[in-house]
Amino acid sequence: MVFCFCFLPRYSPTFEDSCTNVLIEDCYIVSGDDCVAVKSGWDEYGISFGMPTEHLVIRRLTCISPDSVVIALGSEMSGGIQDVRAENILAVNSESGIRIKTAIGRGGFVKDIHVRRMTMKTMKWAFWMTGNYGSHADKNYDPNALPNY
């Protein structure tokens, strides 16, 4: 079992970016940001790299994140996120259980996300999604950028 006490603002203890075949299992995380942050590249850099995060399994996770989310998909997702399985999750005193976030100029996709047996206690939102998350890698981002899939 992994115990992670990372109560730093804007710091996610697990950060999967453009990964394939990842297992996150038997973890107890206390975080000042996302407990699990699933990403796949930022703006035009992620689009040109073009590698999704896929085949991710998250199971037997306990998360406390008073200012953020248990499992975040994005906001950097220009390469896409697919085939994520989460099960046996305990979320306590967190802002939201699942959050999908992106911004103009990111492109990308989110598909085949499956969550089961997620227990949530003292939450603001079970599910939260936005397409206007905001920040970009630099001032030269292209708001009309779209990946070629």
Image (spheres, rainbow, N blue to C red):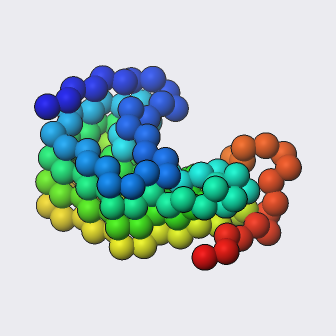
Residue at figure coordinates x 76%, y 67% from the top left: 145
What's the residue at 70%, 52% (across, down)?
45
Question: Visible in this render: residue 103?
Answer: no
Q: Quadrant of the C terminus?
A: bottom right
Residue 25 placed where, x, y %?
19, 43
Residue at the spot 33% in from the left edge and 61% down from the top edge: 55
Q: Is residue 70 left or right of residue 73?
A: left
Q: Up-down: is 47 above or below 38?
A: below
Query: Residue 102: percent from the left, percent from the top?
Result: 59, 59
Residue furthest to the bottom: 149
Q: Residue at x 28, y 68 (%)?
A: 114
**Would residue 47 be found to the left or right of residue 51 on screen?**
right
Quadrant assignment, res 118: bottom left
Total number of numbered discs in the rendering: 0
The picture places residue 129, in percent across and down from the top left corner, at 49, 63
Residue 31 in view in this figure: yes
Position of 36 compared to 29: left or right?
Answer: right
